[in-house]
Amino acid sequence: MQALEAASETAGVSTDALMENAGLACALRIRQRMGGAAGRLVLVLVGPGNNGADGLVVARHLRRWGADVCCYIVRGRPADDPKMTDALAYGVAVVDSSEDHGRPNLGRLLGSCHLVVDAILGAGRYRPLDGLVGDVTVLVNSIRSDRPDLSVVAVDLPTGVNPDTGAADPRAIVADETLALCHPKHGIANFPGAGLAGRVTVLEIGLPAVVSAAADADLPTEWMTPASARALIADRPLVSHKGTFGHLMIVAGSRNFVGAASLAAQGAHRVGAGLVTLAAPDSVYRLAASRLTETIHLPLPEDADGRIDPSAADVILERLNNYSALAVGCGLGLSDGTATLIERLLLLGENPPALPTVIDADGLNNLSQCADWDKRLRAPTVLTPHPGEMTTLTGRPTVEVQADRLEIASQSAKGWRQTVLLKGAHTVVASPGGQRCILPFANPALAAGGTGDVLTGVIGGLLAQGVAPYDAARLGGFLHGTAADRVRSQRGDAGVVASDLLDHLPAVIADLRGPRATRV
Ligand SMILES: NC(=O)C1=CN([C@@H]2O[C@H](COP(=O)(O)OP(=O)(O)OC[C@H]3O[C@@H](n4cnc5c(N)ncnc54)[C@H](O)[C@@H]3O)[C@@H](O)[C@H]2O)[C@H](O)CC1
Ligand SMILES: [K+]
């Protein structure tokens, strides 16, 4: 994490101005979250450093706007602290933890306030919580769990989370929202820190948005927002035809996984691909065709187990010049024959398809069986592994993959010279050129079979329309995550099925695009 001094030097803005900017930005978002400040009782937990200073600035502004504000000083502030002086001058109440033995005042305040601001510890030098801070955070978490009406908003990141790794003290604050100053710290990109942050809102404070990453990270990590997604959505000219929006070939399905092929095809249709062809085993075609009215079908020879026969590679390859993108893997099944199909389709021959390609699920598992696949995969490709498939591809244990998702996805993308979308809560997308972004979705409704197939179709549908692989992956992931959030808000966490996402996709795109004039 860039120290405040270094950050202010970078930006040519004084440290005090940065803290004022940060405090005001946080106060504005908190006021918005509360639906106003007047008459609200806000408790600000203040720590010893600049995170605490931000909290005092937040307190002053909320007080100015009519809130009743009490600052609970968790650890001593400098005696001549100007931020404290300013807060007191505006009538902010102050309780010092050193005079609150047994914490009766803290308990009373937590029981009556509308919102708690966690400004105890932020991105400063991390160490496990000591007794004093730990007592406070445990009490906050305990009362929060008893009061569903109470919101806890963390400044920069929840107290007790390691800003650089995402590791967390067991007593770390559980936040409903985290106000990431300037950029999201790694501590809220990686779990468990990401799981403690709640909704993440990135606030501009007058600093260049660069994530303080490891020394070798050349490019900033982006936290995908509606604005950055909107910028990737192409206009659709009035004068257009189905060929204008590409033709996706999907190679998917097997006797056990008929729905995977169908979901992928529908995902592609729902993000606007002009044409979609499903190349699936003949038995899958017979079952899926009746559900896929708009899809073109290419029934393929199958083996005794109902998987696509390796000989089908030639059937597909001889047609690929008519297509603008390829999606491979959903529901293929895992076998020597399928690995041979993948090798012949993607890696062999004097000229394997140079089509933009997305490979998912068993496409990845079979690919990992092919020797030197990463040196032989030449088409511009998006690989979309979940953590287990990432283990299969990299040989790294899943617990290791999850411990540093951003770095492992980024290193793999550079090493394979392909785009990698590492699925999971806060999906990570990394490009071969070093770009990386985090998709701000952590949605248990997505933990259902088939949602990955929809995502593959979505990304394939965007590739077919000419969106470049890294952009197709991050935009596709953002559309998919937003659609899932809408389904969750309407139907809850459990019982959501993958096809529930499909109808939301066009509306998500329309809402993101907004009322743009359609060019002729
Ligand atoms: N860099 C920027 O862009 C800006 C940062 N701002 C805010 O500054 C904090 C970081 O402030 P800093 O003083 O460096 O650290 P903290 O406030 O997070 O921590 C204070 C202090 O606490 C000590 N400490 C660490 N762990 C513990 C512990 N377990 N128990 C007790 N004390 C602990 C540690 O030594 C720290 O020095 C950043 O998060 C922003 O909120 C500005 O607002 C603007 C720009
Ligand atoms: K904090």
Image (spheres, grey):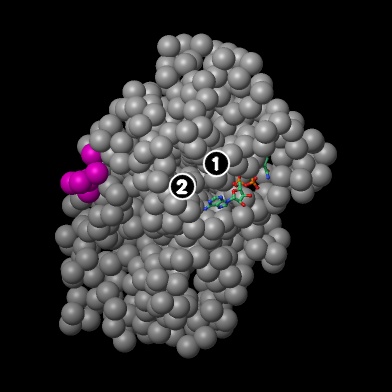
Q: Which image quadrant is residue 125 in?
A: bottom right
Tell me the kind of residue under disc 1.
Arg
Toward the viewer: 376 or 495?
A: 495
Marks 2 and 1 sit apart, C-alpha to C-alpha, by 8 Å
- Which residue in the protein does label 1 denote? 75
Q: Are marks 2 and 1 in contact (CB under 8 Å)?
A: yes
Q: Is residue 202 left or right of residue 199?
A: right
Estimate the x, y position of residue 138 in percent, counting from the top left.
36, 45
Task: Identify the element where label 2 is drawn.
Answer: helix
Toward the viewer: 245 or 404?
A: 404
Quadrant in which the C terminus appears: top right
Tell me the kind of residue under disc 2.
Leu
Question: Which mark is on residue 132?
Answer: 2
Estimate the x, y position of residue 62 in percent, counting from the top left.
54, 19
In reply to whether residue 493 is colored magenta, the answer given is yes
Q: Is residue 341 above or below residue 485?
A: below
Tell me which segment is drawn in magenta. Answer: 492-497
Q: Is residue 397 left or right of residue 333?
A: right
Asked if the residue at label 1 sits under 8 Å from ligand 1, the reply is yes
Asked if the residue at label 2 sits under 8 Å from ligand 1, the reply is yes
Q: Residue at x 30, y 41 (%)?
A: 142
In reply to whether residue 339 is colored magenta, the answer given is no
Q: Is residue 246 left or right of residue 89?
A: left
Q: Is residue 222 left or right of residue 313?
A: right
Which callout, 2 or 1, points at the residue further toward the start of the chain? Answer: 1
Q: Residue at x 71, y 31 (%)?
A: 80
Q: Residue at x 43, y 65 (%)?
A: 402
Q: Is residue 195 above or below residue 335?
A: above
